Image: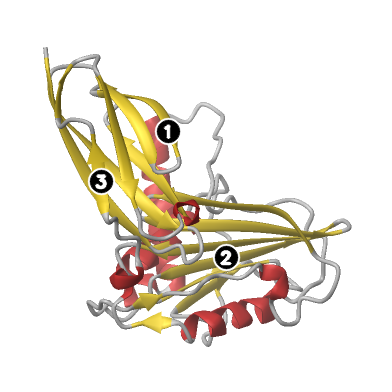
């Protein structure tokens, strides 16, 4: 049981003190290398290129077997981060709390493996306090050792999962195995065929003067509310004026070619695709 977080997973970190950037980079690199050795990260089997991946319409996680009654959903958020779709669901029962994170990598298993390493390494502690977890949980599982275990993270195929418990004695390893079992039964041979695929992308123009308002709309055949779009762009080139669902408006800030990557995420399955849009802005 724990009442304070030991690591920030799928989030940001605040660092204080007089450590310089160079010192921090060197210290962080050494810490990560030591951690990789401790868990045998570099001894994992090489990733075999594959088009397969997990395709699950993820349920509300209070439905997981063994969780028990009276849990309520306190928060449920989906977003794009780095290279895939993430869903964070927080459950509460009185003072008890469970936090679930599910990530599906657009780039497949290798991307998932690296995402897991990156995220468990995000701690301001002098060492990374995860150790190897159960060998029968995913391809690689990690836990913060304790009795009971109050944080577990693992990857399988193109998915990364994490469960943290706060002020509860719920067996999160049992919950993890339930989540893993669900993932194992929903591996598609060609995962990209289940990712969001636009029917069309409508723009009012592909070339415009600087300061002219350009509009774009991504058309999906399914219910558009099932999807979110995250826009990646150079803020020195483009200003996003507004965004409403799959529609957005922008202006060029300087002459030249501008590129926007539109990361589409299916909120149900967390599968994703990336569309590249280009405009030419003139003086």
Residue denoted by label 2:
162
Give the answer, above or below, for where 133 lies relative to 276.
Answer: below
For marks 2 and 3 on the same chain, the one whose residue lies earlier in the sequence:
2
Q: Residue at x 43, y 74 (%)?
A: 55
For marks 1 and 2 on the same chain, the one whose residue lies earlier in the sequence:
2
Residue toward you, 237 or 42: 237
Q: Residue at x 49, y 58 (%)?
A: 267
The quarter of the picture where residue 20 lies is: top left
Residue denoted by label 3:
201
Residue toward you, 198 or 88: 198
Q: Position of residue 6 (x, y in %)?
A: 66, 53
For marks 1 and 3 on the same chain, the one whose residue lies earlier in the sequence:
3
Residue denoted by label 1:
243
Residues tagged 1 and 2 counted as in contact (Cβ below 8 A): no
Q: Residue at x 81, y 65 (%)?
A: 71
Compute the Cα span from label 1 to label 3: 15 Å
Q: Position of residue 125 (x, y in %)?
A: 57, 48
Looking at the rendered image, the quarter that the C terminus falls into is: top left
């Amino acid at each position: 049981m724990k009442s304070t977080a030991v690591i920030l997973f799928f989030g940001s970190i605040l660092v204080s003190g007089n450590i310089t950037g160079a010192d921090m980079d060197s210290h962080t690199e050494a810490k990560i290398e030591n951690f990789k050795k401790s868990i045998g990260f570099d001894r994992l089997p090489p990733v075999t290129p594959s088009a397969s991946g997990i395709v699950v319409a993820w349920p509300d996680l209070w439905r997981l077997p063994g969780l028990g009654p009276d849990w309520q959903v306190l928060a449920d958020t989906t977003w794009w981060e780095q290279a895939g779709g993430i869903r964070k669901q927080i459950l509460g029962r009185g003072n008890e709390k469970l936090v679930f994170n599910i990530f599906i990598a657009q780039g497949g298993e290798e991307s998932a493996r690296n995402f897991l390493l990156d995220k468990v390494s995000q701690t301001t502690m002098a060492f990374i306090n995860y150790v190897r977890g159960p060998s029968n949980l995913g391809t690689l599982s990690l836990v913060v050792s304790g009795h009971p275990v109050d944080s577990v993270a693992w990857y399988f195929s193109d998915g990364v999962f994490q469960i943290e418990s706060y002020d509860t004695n719920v067996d999160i390893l049992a919950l993890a195995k339930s989540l893993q079992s669900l993932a194992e039964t929903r591996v598609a041979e060609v995962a990209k065929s289940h990712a969001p695929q636009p029917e069309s992308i409508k723009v009012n123009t592909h070339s415009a003067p600087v300061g002219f308002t350009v509009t774009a709309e991504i058309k999906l055949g399914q219910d558009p509310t099932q999807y979110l779009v995250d826009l990646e762009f150079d803020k020195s080139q483009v200003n996003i004026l507004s965004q409403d669902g799959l529609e957005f408006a922008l202006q060029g800030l300087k002459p030249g070619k501008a590129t926007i990557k539109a990361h589409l995420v299916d909120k149900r399955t967390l599968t994703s695709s990336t569309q590249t849009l280009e405009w030419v802005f003139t003086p």
